[in-house]
Amino acid sequence: MTRVEMTVNGKPVSGEVEGRTLLVEFLRDRLRLTGTHVGCDTSQCGACVVHLDGAPVKACAALALDLQGADVVTIEGVAAPDGTLSPVQQAFNEHHGLQCGFCTPGMIMSATALLRDNPRPTEAEIRDYLEGNICRCTGYHNIVKAIMAASGQDVSAVAAE
Amino acid sequence: MYDFEFAKPGTIAEAAAALKGEGAQALGGGQTLLPTMKQRLAAPELLVSLSGIAEMQGVCVSDAGEVCIGGATTHATVAREAAAHYPALADLAGRIGDPAVRNRGTIGGSLANNDPSACYPAAALGSGARILTNTREIAADAFFEGMFATALEEGEIITEVRFPVPQVAAWAKFAQPASRFALVGVFVARFADGVRVAVTGASSDGVFRWTEAEAALGASFEAEALAPLSPPGGDMISDIHGSGDYRAHLVKVMAGRAVAAAG
């Protein structure tokens, strides 16, 4: 076991981990931050997406020990400290961008990263960016709509097809 | 996955020393190796991460005009930083996998693994790139030795890849819709002294140069120049996603699209 130290959601954290301990295991099992989900565990589905030094990565495909000193933000770190939802979270709520909710943490993290790089993405750009985030309930329409709304674009004409 | 010792050296020399150990394996971004280890298809005793080596990071342009990419540079960084210097290469890097994978996966890891459907081998072979390691330089033409096989020795590290910049080039990828690997991908590059056409995803031997197309395009750099050619022969991959004949047909289609896109 080796000690790993990193910053998670703005707070310094540390713990003893094995070589094989994945970032997502460190987050969920040690830090009890269970908002980050494990869907497929084969880096396909994107339910485990977190931000690593500002960029979205799949937490099931990164080793905790490889991230010594890293700055990680999970879904628990997205809302304001007083619980006010972020614009993306608020838009998912308002536009029903989820059904079962399992993929939602990863969707929110990816969407947040997209809007940071591209503040007014087109529908096609949103769908392309969500390539690695799989949702088996919604058919994606309301997810795309929510992200467009979070970017301040008018979605009144965007109907679920 | 089975447990292992973990090392994260800060220099190429330290990494090379660590990789001399019994059962040691280099770790790039881990986007292929970690899933492989989870399936217990690989079980290294020591994993040596290359992501902490500053001298293996980043994109620059050499005095000779080559685009030089550190072996531990992520696909996302190449997509961003090579765009002004070699747009076709940046386009290829920016369409590997998905955004989260591109933030971890590295060029050195992709080339060293030489997956027969990976994107980067097509760019390296199609550009006539030079692959620099901790001990030597290997021409792309001598680097790829068949499915998951390369000229790399045990413990040898890809420290940098140098791409000559062609006059025009383009990458045409027919993505396998689930994996985002290339069902067939063709990289076409026209240099002053000839055209190179590299194909990934199609052959059981991995990336290859389609020399008949290179000759035809060398005479006339138009998609129509490919029309008289038969699809490439050889042992094509055949699976539930496409037969060998289908892949061979796609090679010709995607090569034509790449030429049209290169203009």
Image: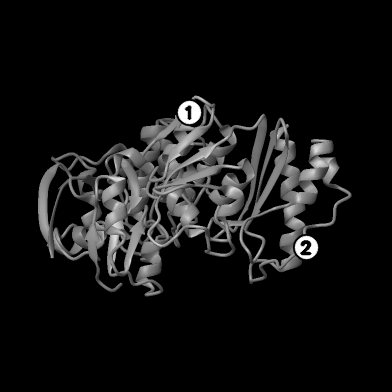
Judging from the image, what secondary structure is the residue with disc 1 in? Answer: strand
Circle on res. B233? 2
Instruction: Check disc 1 and give the amino acid type.
Output: Val
Which residue does the image show at 34% across and 52% down from the upper left? Answer: A106
Question: Which residue is denoted by mark 1 in the rendering?
Answer: B61
Q: Quadrant of residue B164?
A: top right
Q: Quadrant of the C terminus of chain B?
A: top right
When the figure is inspected, residue A13 is found, relative to residue A154, above or below; the finding is below
Check residue B89 in the rendering and tell me which mark sits there, or answer none. Answer: none
Q: Chain of mark 2?
A: B
Identity of the residue drawn at 48% across and 28% down? B62
> On the rendered image, what quadrant is the N terminus of chain B found in?
bottom left
Binning the other alpha carbons within 10 Å of mark 2 as few (below 14), some (14 to 19) or many (20 upward) gives few
Where is residue A27 shown, x and y percent of the image?
20, 57
Same chain for mark 1 and mark 2? The answer is yes
Q: Is residue A18 left or right of residue B223?
A: left
Give the image quarter of residue B31.
bottom left
